[in-house]
Image (cartoon, coloured by chain):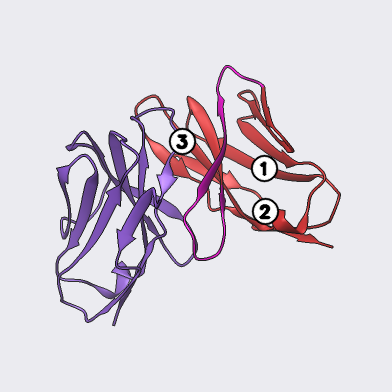
Chain colours: A red, B purple
Amino acid sequence: SQKIEQNSEALNIQEGKTATLTCNYTNYSPAYLQWYRQDPGRGPVFLLLIRENEKEKRKERLKVTFDTTLKQSLFHITASQPADSATYLCVAYSSASKIIFGSGTRLSIRP
Amino acid sequence: DTAVSQTPKYLVTQMGNDKSIKCEQNLGHDTMYWYKQDSKKFLKIMFSYNNKELIINETVPNRFSPKSPDKAHLNLHINSLELGDSAVYFCASSQRTGNNEQFFGPGTRLTVL
């Protein structure tokens, strides 16, 4: 079956370090991937989009990569801050309008 | 200046009842969505409408019926509520279908007793 897996349910890192979150997909060929941030009790908020023909996208301290050979996307937050603590969701979209969300990775940045 | 709003925010009801959740977006978007987020935090798409026309209808019990009176509104009606319907329901909108960011509402927490 088609699956999006975010490998870590929770990730705990020291402030100032780079957080790296992983999203793997199986039996699926997404045309593009999006990453969202979700805070407790709130709806997800869009962060970045990357297409299958793009290797990397950046936005301020955020970077996302898309490796169609490894069937994987990596999401990086550099110089992490406690305010970056949240759940991050990977979302895959196929050309047939199929939308699949990953289960999310809960990121905690400790001061 | 709420972009995507949902009412109510909380809904507690008895099994077997019929309830509705309303969603409105003031972004001028063409596409709207309903998602269900269960206790394990998985977000699953239920429906998507583009310009009042149903374009995505995932495997959802037919007790769930979306209604789009105009492209700014997408309401969700649920008949004969069951315990397993308890979840947070999110409405979202995007400019159009395809590779567009989605703007999510604050969610409606439904508890079926």
Front one among A20 and A30: A20
Q: Position of residue A106 (x, y in %)?
A: 64, 58
Q: Are marks 2 and 1 in contact (CB under 8 Å)?
A: yes
**Tag 2–tag 3 contact (CB < 8 Å):** no
Q: Is residue A63 part of the magenta span, yes or no? A: no
Q: Residues within 10 Å of mark 2 (few under 14, many from 20)?
A: some
* Camera sees residue B73: yes
Q: Chain of mark 2?
A: A
* Disc 2/disc 1 C-alpha distance (Å): 7 Å
Write down the region rendered in magenta. Answer: A37-55
Query: What subunit carries mark 1?
Result: A
Q: Residue at x 16, y 60 (%)?
A: B63
Query: Quarter of the image containing the C terminus of chain B?
Result: bottom left
* Residue drawn at the location 43% of the way across and 40% of the way down: B102
Type of the residue with mark 3 = Glu
- Circle 1 residue: A22
Asked whether the residues under marks 1 and 3 belong to the same chain, the reply is no
Q: Is residue B13 left or right of residue A42?
A: left
